[in-house]
Image (tube, helix red, strand yellow):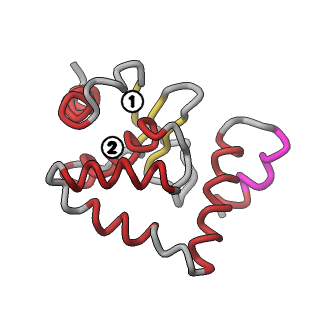
Amino acid sequence: MHHLRRLFDDLDATFFKRRLKGYRVRRSDSLPRNMRGYCDLERQLIRIKPGITGDSLRRLLLHEMCHAAARYGGHGKTFLRQLERLEAAGELWAREEIEGYSRSASAGYWREQVTDVLENVAMSGDPEFSKWKESRRT
């Protein structure tokens, strides 16, 4: 079994009670430059950029799995609840992410939320957003 799949299955069993077993996980060079991972909720596919290994891979995979468990592509309340579950289970790094995404009063937060939504639409393959998607790569 491939290392990435084995890691996904282990994390799914440990933190998500195997609720994500229908998801596929693979390495992908086709993500925009500013994205290290992406959870495609519709296709039940998590894509991870090549070259990410060790603890960084584990954290990134858990982050994307939180999107899958929340059934939400952004970093709102449902996603944050998943991170809080990880923190409660001993994943202390999740606190940093929770705090980063919880700064709802800042303009950066709203810019990130809009960017998340647009990136999710762009990644869906909608031709109307192909120009925006390409502009994010430069």
Residue 16 lies, in percent from the top left, at 28, 33
Question: Where does the N terminus fall, quadrant-wise?
Answer: top left
Identify the residue at horizontal 32%, vertical 48% (top origin): 51
Provide the secondary structure element on which disc 2 rests: helix
Q: Residue type at mark 1? A: Val
- In the image: residue 17, left or right of residue 72: left
Magenta stretch? 127-134
Residue 20 position (above or below residue 125): above
Residue 123 lies, in percent from the top left, at 65, 41
Q: Main secondary structure of the magenta part?
A: helix
Give yes or no for contact between labels 1 and 2 (Cβ–Cβ under 8 Å).
yes
- Residue bearing mark 1: 25
- In the image: residue 69, left or right of residue 59: right
Residue 96 position (above or below residue 71): below
Residue 9 lies, in percent from the top left, at 24, 26
Q: Residue type at mark 2? A: Leu
Is 130 within the magenta? yes
